[in-house]
Image: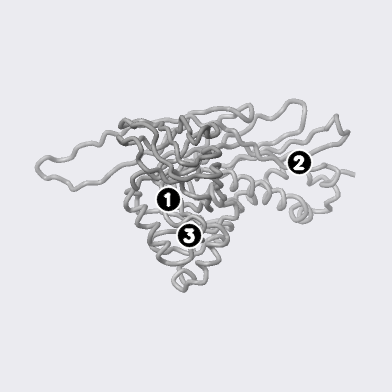
Amino acid sequence: MANGFITVKEIARQTLPRLIENLVFPNLIHKDFSDDFVAGKGATIQVKKPVILTAKDFDEIEGTSAQDVKEESVDVTLDKLATVDIEFGAIQRATNVDDLNRLFLEPAAVALAEKINSDGLFLYKDIPYAVGKAGTTPSTLKDLADVRKMLNTNKVPVANRIAVWDPEADANFTTIDAIVNAEKSGSVTALREGSIGRVFGLDNYMAQGIKQHNTGITAATGIKVNGKVNEGAKTLSIDGTTLTGKLLRGDILTIKKNNYVVTENTEEASSNAIATVKVYPALPEIADDTVVTLVSSHTANLAFNPMAFAFVTRPLNTPAGVEAYVTSYNGITLRVVRGYDMKHKKEMLSMDVLYGYKTMYPELATRVLG
């Protein structure tokens, strides 16, 4: 006999708050949400970038002058569809709402949150700025001071600075008295439990999904710029005494003490050279044979202002001919669908979240190498 309390509406309403409680990264960055339904994965929408303003002294003689506010929009592809599918017969074995939450909905919410958190942390690949030493896990107050220095150098707003650390760095920092005794912050469960305190103007959090970046170059010695680079260029050629493999999106090149991130995977090196390397930011004028250093493989911890990144969600249309319910809260939309799987002859329940991420202002973030 079907349990009357198990409806797609009740499942959606019970699951969404648990999902939001388990999110970390999306709750730390800019969110863009509207009630406009989209058909599904792959939809592209225009999102307005947050406006950055500056303050200055009031001039009693000249009076006020309005800043030139440029509203810019960027295209964001909703290319992520996190889903959890459960055989509905298993759910029906729950005898009460507490069983339903404990056995099915809480695990489903955690699984969705882990996927959504993990996807966002790939945004490190857009960031050229970096502090720390590749292969060495941050562990001291000086490491935090170096992060602060980089953010200050890049004129990142002082308010709301955030850092997310992998579990090893988190373990190191939680042995430092200045961090252990710092006031905890965060408005939802995952933020409170993930917080390791505010130090040097940074709200610090642990994130299990922090990425390991592995460069695609397998051997490299004597790398140099191959040919003069004109100011403003976004591509260059490199060669070396030895150069095998290829550069991958997210690799960092250091040229004359400045970092540039590779924005697209390159072709495999041929005759110890790579003909076209696309990078960000734009290059200054660089002479032929200028030395190039490749940052080694590393753990990509991140420090940033929330406006550096955007988490974008839209509600999904409900499919025809099935029982479905869509609910939204605090910038997150969850769709629950109950339907029959003709291929496997089973009644299934699906919980979906559609979303995309976008780097809005890369200059407002830095990697912290580990």
The quarter of the picture where residue 203 lies is: bottom left
| Residue located beneath label 1 in the image | 130
Mark 1 vs mark 2, foreground winner is 1
Is the Cβ of the residue at disc 3 closer than 8 Å to that at disc 2? no
Q: Residue at x 50, y 50 (%)?
A: 296
Characterize the local packing of mark 3: few (<14), some (14-19) or many (20 or more) Cα atoms within 10 angstroms: many
In the displayed structure, does residue 66 sit left or right of residue 267? left
| Residue located beneath label 3 in the image | 204
Q: Position of residue 170 (x, y in %)?
A: 54, 63
In the displayed structure, does residue 329 sit left or right of residue 234? right
Compute the Cα span from label 1 to label 2: 39 Å
| Residue located beneath label 2 in the image | 85
Specify the amino acid type for callout 2. Answer: Asp
SS under mark 2: strand
- Dot 3 or dot 2, earlier in sequence: 2
SS under mark 3: strand
- Dot 1 or dot 2, earlier in sequence: 2
Q: Position of residue 311 (x, y in %)?
A: 52, 41
In the displayed structure, does residue 264 sit left or right of residue 57? right
